[in-house]
Image (cartoon, helix red, strand yellow):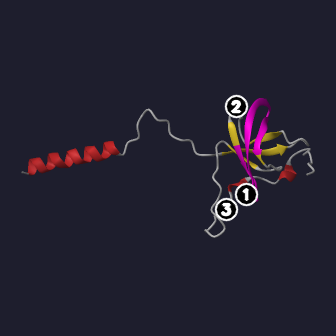
Amino acid sequence: MMKRAFIFGLACLAWVSCATKEPEGKPKAELPRLVGRIASIPPDKRFVLIQSFGKWTAEPGTILTTRGADQRSANLLVTGEALGQFAAADLQSGHIELGDAVYSQHVPKPPAASEPATESPAAEVSPAEDVKNPQKTTD
């Protein structure tokens, strides 16, 4: 009787451990990460220059998202032009301003004002004043 209970226990443990494993064929979803900030916006606002916070690794055609301090967001399409820590991206949709945070993937909007809010991820971005030679835009 004790032997059967032990074997049954091992079988249950093996079944539970197999059920919690992720399938090997599926890649894990990458979390959005802060990759840079908007460093320059030409007057026509058709593209932007992104100052990267590390080595630039985004392939041409990659979609990036931005988040501004007042919860503005935009989608950018990486063009492939890069020089040093700066890279160009086309503005696909949304509204951008100097200093907006640029993320590697979509960042969901924070909770509504009625829900408890945490600090915005855009707060990590340093102010636009420290950009050398920023281009001023007029709306």
* Mark 2, residue position: 61
Left or right of 113 in this view: 134: right
Q: Residue at x 78, y 37 (%)?
A: 90
Question: What is the quadrant of residue 127 in the picture?
Answer: bottom right
Closer mark to the observer between disc 1 and disc 3: 1
Label 1: few (<14), some (14–19) or many (≥20) C-alpha neighbours in 10 Å: few
66 in the magenta segment: yes
Q: Which percent across, then down, holds residue 20?
A: 36, 46
- Work out whether mark 1 precedes mark 2 in sequence or the reverse, and give the earlier one: 2
Q: Residue at x 63, y 52 (%)?
A: 108
Left or right of 41 in this view: 122: left
CB-based contact (under 8 Å), mark 1 and mark 3 = no
Could you say whether the residue bearing mark 1 is in a helix, strand or loop? loop
Task: Kindly identify the amino acid type of the residue bearing the numbered disc 1.
Answer: Gln
Label 3: few (<14), some (14–19) or many (≥20) C-alpha neighbours in 10 Å: few
Task: Kindly identify the amino acid type of the residue bearing the numbered disc 2.
Answer: Gly
* Mark 1, residue position: 71
The residue stretch that appears in magenta: 65-93
Q: Is residue 85 visible?
A: no
Disc 1 versus disc 2: distance between alpha carbons? 25 Å
Q: Residue at x 64, y 65 (%)?
A: 117
Disc 1 versus disc 3: distance between alpha carbons? 12 Å
- Work out whether mark 3 precedes mark 2 in sequence or the reverse, and give the earlier one: 2
Q: Specify the farthest residue to the bottom.
A: 114
* Mark 3, residue position: 119
Question: What is the quadrant of residue 53 in the picture?
Answer: top right
Q: Specify the farthest residue to the left.
A: 1
Task: Kindly identify the amino acid type of the residue bearing the numbered disc 3.
Answer: Glu
Q: Specify the farthest residue to the front.
A: 93
CB-based contact (under 8 Å), mark 1 and mark 2 = no
